[in-house]
Amino acid sequence: MATPLRVAAQASGLSEYERRVVGIAMRERDRVGAMLARPDVVAIADFSKPSHDARLHFVDMVGGSVRSHLVAHGRGSDPAHVGWLKQFSNSVGSFATSRGAYLTAGQYEGKYGASMRLRGLDLDNSNAFDRAIVMHPAWYAAPDMLAKFGKLGRSEGCFAMAPEDFSLVLGHLGAGRLLYADRISEA
């Protein structure tokens, strides 16, 4: 594998929170780097933030920029549907979001259209493939849900995004890249 990429100096123009996101992206990319076909973009999902915040961050590891989007969490992670992830689970049938590193594993056409498979790389998300945990577009993850309800809808553990934002996932991530999910603001 080629020498790991370093984030360019532009990262210094980022907010303190964005610098933390970049630091976690670098740490996780370095930890699982041998499994990545492309280490140039890393996605970080920060589930310490509520669903009304843009908490899925795409880190350009070459240019040092961060782009943030809305993302839903699983209904098993938020049973009372308050808009905050309360718990992670890797159990089949939990309908919860799992924490850990995921490898993006290719595009397919699913219930919500073009979607991306994920393969869990950690013990905390090792059942992702069996649970059909993927990234996909969904109407319930669109900004108009915030205007109506003040929070996004919930998935069955998948990383669901607004349809208009999801094309960025397909363009920015693609197969062989890293998605990392946790409560990073609390870590």
Image (cartoon, rainbow, N blue to C red):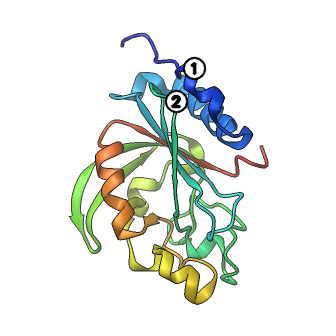
Q: Quick check: 140 left or right of 13? A: left
Q: In which quarter of the image is the N terminus?
A: top left
Q: Residue at x 34, y 67 (%)?
A: 164
Q: Which of 66 and 49 is in front in this view?
A: 66
Q: Is residue 24 visible?
A: yes
Does residue 105 show up? no
Query: Of the numbered discs in the image, which one, if any, rests on residue 9?
Result: 1
Residue name at image x 60 percent, y 74 percent: 76
x then y, percent, for residue 141: 47, 73
Q: What residue type is labelled 2?
A: Gly
Residue underneath mark 2: 64
Q: How far apart are marks 1 and 2 (CA)?
A: 7 Å
Horizontal side, residue 39 vs residue 99: left or right: left
Secondary element under disc 1, as helix, strand or loop, is: helix
Q: Splitting the image into 4 quarters, where does residue 136 fall?
A: bottom left
Task: List the single residue furthest toward the top.
Answer: 3
Residue sitting nearer the eye, 166 or 144: 144
Q: Position of residue 99 (x, y in %)?
A: 60, 51
C-beta proximity under 8 Å, tags 1 and 2 = yes
Residue at the limit of the structure toward the bottom, as seen here:
148
Q: Residues within 10 Å of mark 1 (few under 14, many from 20)?
A: few
3 or 55, which is in the foreground?
55
> Residue reaching furthest front?
13
Residue type at mark 1 is Ala
How far from the left and from the top, in percent, is residue 185?
75, 48
Where residue 5 sits: x, y (%)?
46, 18
Looking at the rendering, in which quadrant would you find the C terminus? top right
Local packing at callout 2 (Cα closer than 10 Å; few below 14, some 14-19, many 20+) is: many
Image quadrant assignment for residue 87: bottom right
* Left or right of residue 77: residue 7: left
